[in-house]
Image (cartoon, rainbow, N blue to C red):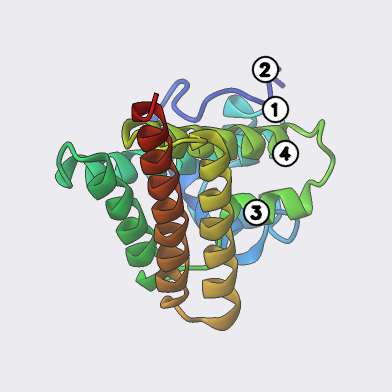
Amino acid sequence: MRKKSAASPAAEGSTPKRDLLLDTADRLFYRDGFHAVGIDTILAEAGLAKMTLYHHFASKEELIVASLHRRVDAIRTGVKAAMEAAGSSPRKRLLALFDWYEAWFKSKGFNGCAFIRAVGEYPTLESPVHQLVLQQKQKSREGLALLLTEMELPGAKALAAQIQLLLEGAIVCAHTYGDPSTLSAARDAALALIKVAEQKRSAQAAGSRAF
């Protein structure tokens, strides 16, 4: 059995069989859960032999990490396209991010956040699965902070953490209640937080002009 790091990127050594294996694993993991789906089920669904799995992945955990990397890449591509279509305004790009989430909530097969569920099944911080999710969530927060910084809002990092909490909560509520409109509440709350930050920025500017 070939050994390699459990944190190998999803795109490493792409082949038709590897891609089919990852596509099948990702679909089944997202639908049924990571622990509930066994290797034999994935291979049977994909019509592949066990040797194909171990030619590309040293373990089921490594397959899970690679499938999550694949999902990260797909999300980043989708979000980037939505933001680019919104133009250069950071505010419009932020609103486009919320629109992307809303479209996702309304999409066929929406089943909550694969990353939140992965952490629930792999709660140990040292787990490669948990570490990948942590990195993905941190990158998302950093992207929000960058947008808010471009909007010249004070406390962009703290505000980004607050808006991320709203988005994460919206995902859970949309999944729990089967109600995509929960995104509207998250958007309204985020805009309210941004308005407070804008008022703070205006007050700071007025204060600086007074001296």
Comes first in the chain, label 2 or label 4? 2
Q: What residue is rendered at 49% in x and 39% in y?
A: 140
In percent of the image, x 57 and y 27: which residue is there? 56
Circle 4 SS class? helix
Label 3 or label 2, whichever comes before in sequence order: 2
Q: Which residue is mark 4?
A: 130
- Residue 210 — which label? none
Three-letter residue code for mark 1 = Ala
Q: Evaluate if marks 2 and 1 touch, with contact meaning CB atoms under 8 Å apart.
A: yes
- Cα separation, mark 2 vs mark 1, equals 7 Å
On the picture, is 163 further left or further right than 75?
right
What's the CA distance linking mark 2 and mark 4? Answer: 18 Å
- Report the residue marked by disc 1: 58
Amino acid of disc 3: Ile
Q: Position of residue 211 (x, y in %)?
A: 39, 23
User: Would residue 86 be found to the left or right of residue 79 on screen?
Assistant: left
Which comes sooner in the sequence, label 3 or label 1? Answer: 1
The answer to whether residue 203 shows anywhere in this view is yes
Q: Quadrant of residue 16?
A: top left
* Left or right of 136, for residue 125: right
